[in-house]
Image (tube, rainbow, N blue to C red):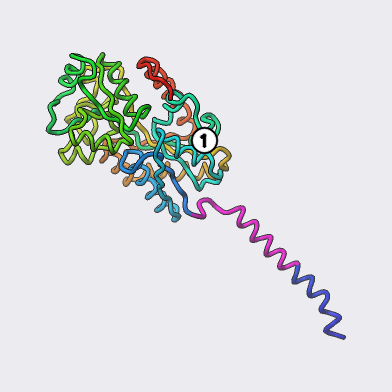
Amino acid sequence: MHATKHSAPWLPRFALGALAALSFLSIGVHAETWPARPVKIVVPYPPGGAVDAVTRKMAQRLTEQTGQSFFVENKPGATGTIGAVQVARSAPDGYTLLANDTTYALLPHIFRKLPFDYAQDLQPVCAYVFAPMGLVVKADGKYKTLAELLTAAKAGDNKVSYGSGGPGSTPHFASEALGMAAGAHFMHVPFKGAGEATVALLGGTVDFQMASISGVIGQVQGNKLRVLAVSGDKRLPALPGVTTFAEAGVRGFGVTNFTGLWAPKGTPPEVLARLQKEVSAAMATPDMRTYAQGIGADAGYWDTNAFRKEMGERMAFWGKVASGTGFEKQ
């Protein structure tokens, strides 16, 4: 009778304890500190391009800083929209991000209808590693200076050809922007990605490529490609002998590229704040600064507000290029 008398009160206390433990575990699951598991960064282009290379370097740095894995997944196609759609439709929890460059500002000028809501579905988080665009030719090719190439282009429409990652890509519009600024006309030869365009240039299929310096610096340093001029208002420490377009006589061409991150709409503010903090910290390290300089880029950082402002200005610029070249939306 003694045991029976005290067993009833004991059971409720045990049950309450178990419920409290379960409740604590549930709260812990929902209140996990990001990143608590691997983070996927979708690069919407094939491996080998500038966005891919820079994103992989940043992913490595974020992995080291947070102790959690950040990894790249390539989802190329349709000028980056296939990868963008994947991220836009992902859970807004910070575990699927989109990496892109100034091409993202081109999308409204390329497509009549996008497969996602451009203004709402993805939100810019931050941008980093700012690389000028460079006009590159085969090192042993016939064009030794920018003046020679432009003279040939002005002598006859479509005499000088260039490769790009496809219609509407940044190299495509940048090449056309150069033509508008210089009064020259080029023949566009599209490929499936910037990497393929570089291979075509190396093989002599096209005369030049307008590329982010960070994407071709290896071939330049290996004496396979030559840079005739770079955008921006100063020469690059990595290529001190290469003039800017302005120095070479082409003014009004200041196209530079960046690598940035976007997240699905609804991603928690605290997750975005942590991501910005980590990227900002990464760009302040000697490792990332040395890396950026080594690929002919600047180690900088835009927070969300600066990123939104710059994107608006890029969209306006590309709109003028699309209008000036008569580009028809797809």
Magenta stretch: dominant secondary structure: helix
Q: Quadrant of residue 76?
A: top left
x, y (%) of residue 49? 31, 39
Q: Residue at horizontal 18%, vertical 36%?
A: 203
Q: Residue at horizontal 85%, vertical 82%?
A: 4
Q: Residue at horizontal 43%, vertical 31%?
A: 104
Count how many numbered circles sit on residues in the image.
1
* Quadrant location, the N terminus: bottom right
Q: Is residue 117 magenta?
A: no
Q: Which of 284 and 70 is in front in this view?
A: 70
**Residue 222 relative to residue 286: left or right:** left
Q: Does the magenta stretch include residue 21?
A: yes
Does the image show residue 279? yes
* Quadrant location, the C terminus: top left
Q: Residue at horizontal 83%, vertical 84%?
A: 3
Name the residue type under label 1.
Answer: Leu
**Residue 87 relative to residue 24: left or right:** left
x, y (%) of residue 90? 53, 43
Q: Quadrant of residue 284?
A: top left
Magenta-tinted stretch: 16-37
Q: Nearer the viewer, residue 185 or 248?
A: 185
